[in-house]
Amino acid sequence: MKASQKIKMILFTLGILVVANACRKDATAEIAAIPAEENNKTIEGIYAGVFKVVYPDTTMFGPVTVVFENGDYTCSNGSFYVPAGGNGSFEADDSLHFSDGNFYQASFDWSLILRGDYGYELTDTSLLIQAHRNGPCYYEYKLTKQ
């Protein structure tokens, strides 16, 4: 292998590492959960906003509406399962716990369904729900109370 080919290979490898590291830092940003009980706020109500999923090679966005009522939730679904929706019961403490017992096709990333455990930040007018799943993948619901 010629010296110029070796240099190109090294630069290419370094470029991939830099891009992967930059994506990884963005995808692993943490926001401390502020439980509703601690800040005297309730999650009940209708929230609308943007769902974001960050994969190692792409980021996708979709509009979303989530309704919280009496311990139950309903999440709208978007084009191409971004997000995939979900409905069932939820609990809020130091994290949000969503239980969805619906049946789904196996043809998409099931982490696009609002279910399982998520970190969250709640204010008077907004709700941020986030989780890291499937290795470096990041799922976020950035919502405004309606």
Image (spheres, rainbow, N blue to C red):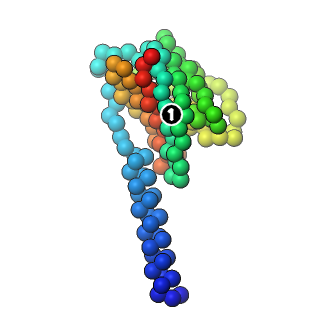
Q: Give above or below for 39 relative to 81.
A: above
Left or right, residue 126 beside residue 113: left
In x, y percent, where is residue 110? 60, 37
Quarter of image, res 19? bottom left
Identify the amino acid type marked 1: Phe
| View extreme (left): residue | 39
Between residues 12 and 112, which one lies in front from this camera angle?
A: 12
In x, y percent, where is residue 79? 63, 34
Q: Which quadrant is the C terminus positioned in?
A: top left
Left or right, residue 108 beside residue 48: right
In x, y percent, where is residue 51? 50, 33
| View extreme (top): residue | 70
Between residues 128 and 86, which one lies in front from this camera angle?
A: 128
- How many numbered discs sit on the rendered protein? 1
The answer to whether residue 71 is visible is no
Badge 1 marks a residue whose secondary structure is strand
At x 69%, y 41%, the residue is 107
In x, y percent, where is residue 141? 47, 31
| View extreme (bottom): residue | 2
At x 40%, y 48%, the residue is 26
At x 49%, y 12%, the residue is 69
Q: Give above or below for 105 relative to 69.
A: below
Q: Residues within 10 Å of mark 1 (few under 14, many from 20)?
A: many
At x 61%, y 31%, the residue is 78
The answer to whether residue 9 is visible is yes
Between residues 134 and 48, which one lies in front from this camera angle?
A: 48
Q: Label 1, on which residue?
A: 51
Left or right, residue 74 beside residue 34: right
